[in-house]
Image (cartoon, coloured by chain):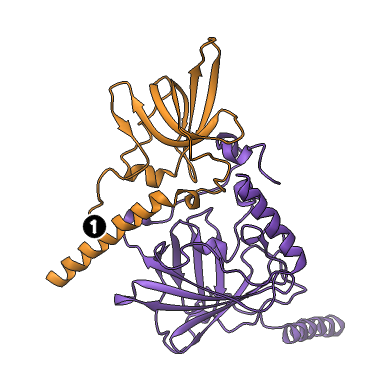
Chain colours: A orange, B purple
Amino acid sequence: MKGFQRFRRFQGFQAFVGFAVLAIAAPALAHHSAAGIDRSKTVTLAGTVKQFGWQNPHSWMEVDVPGDNGVVTTWKVEMTSPAFLIRAGWKASTVKPGDKVTVKVFPLRDGDPGGLFQSVTFADGSTLTERPAIARQP
Amino acid sequence: MKLITATSLAIVMAIAGVAAQAPTPELGVLAPSNLSKPRPAPPFTVTGTWFIDLQFPGSWQFGPPYPKLTADAQKHFDAAQKARAEGKVYRDDIGQCWPAGVPMIMTRVWSIAMVQLPTVVYMVSGFMNSLRIINMDGRPHTDPDLLVRTANGDSIGRWENDALVIDTVGFKGDHHWIASGIPASDALHIVERVKLVGPNGTKMQIEYTLTDPKSWEGEWKVTKQWNRVDARDMEIAEVECLPDLNSHIPSTQSKENVR
């Protein structure tokens, strides 16, 4: 039995290491190449959620961001799959249209208003990313 | 009356004759009488859920190193390298919902569900639910005149000592890449030697031998490793590349992508 418990702990450790590596290997998770994303820059979007797609292979979010001139720009934010978001503490109801949020993204290189999700901070100050918050238990 | 009897007899005999000449339909892999045929016990089963081992040398990518490419393939490779250096995406067909195809579908960072029966192995990738069918009932490859070419090809498998050997031909030959800038043609031929390794068969290794005289010279050998993942949250799910998906995924729409 102890041997079995050790094996289960080993499995749990493997899973944790695996997901840690996965967080680094994000481009491979995507159904597309991430070469068009500029990972050397971070853009912070303060705005209102327009839509949230809880969808495979990618979830996604649209955020309406008011500019200095009063013009609202809709940013398209691509995210990982729901399976990985669940491990990071997300649910389908985590984000709803109308929510006031601050979203950090790696922007597109071509300058269009879009990017790869890094984190979201909600009005209550709580923050979510795509990384598992804690090591998974077996 | 005699005429009617004679006519009826002739019809019955004709039908019987046709029936006698008709070939016996070949059994499908899931036919109970095919599944129950006596066969040697397989040395192992691949049934389970598997996930590419990102810590194994080479991780999920095929190359580098790369084989010596043909002139046509080299043009693609050089263009892909140039695009990469410029921060652009080269011919990202998977991003446009084209199937990844074998072998790349095996190493996408998604779980693969495998079900092994005596006559067939089914592999379903969590990535777009791409299906591989490996016929194990002793049939040869599909007649080239009947074959419908696909991204995952026409696979037959056999047991060789402690390995499952999968032979795959019949690839479609367009929008199919082994790695960025390395095209697969309709001449692609893949042999996979599948083995279980590690404690209690919790790891699976596949030694790939890739040949494609239209794209590279000689044999390209690559070994990949997968971990068995038993947790419920590692199961595959329904995943499709839907027509409206990319409208929400901005990097697939980038003006800088090299089509």
Direction from residue B167 to residue A90 in the image, left or right: left
**Of the pair A3 and A37, the residue shown nearer to us:** A37
Of all residues, the one furthest to the right in this rendering is: B3
Q: Residue B240 location, x and y as percent?
A: 54, 48
Of all residues, the one furthest to the top in this rendering is: A70
Label 1, residues with CA under 10 Å away: few <14, some 14-19, many ≥20: some
Q: Three-letter amino acid code at disc 1?
A: Pro
Direction from residue B211 to residue B116 in the image, left or right: left
* Residue B106 visible in the picture: yes
Q: Quadrant of the N terminus of chain B?
A: bottom right
Rendered view: A2 above or below A12:
below
Q: Residue B194 location, x and y as percent?
A: 47, 77
- The residue under the point 54% across, 10% down is A69
Q: Residue A71 location, x and y as percent?
A: 56, 13
- The residue under the point 66% across, 58% down is B181
* Residue A1 visible in the picture: no
- Which SS class for mark 1? loop
**Of the pair A90 and B141, the residue shown nearer to us:** A90
Rendered view: A113 above or below B202:
above
- The residue under the point 51% across, 64% down is B106
Which residue corresponds to mark 1?
A: A138
Direction from residue B166 to residue B169 in the image, left or right: right
Q: Residue A67 location, x and y as percent?
A: 51, 15
- The residue under the point 71% across, 58% down is B76
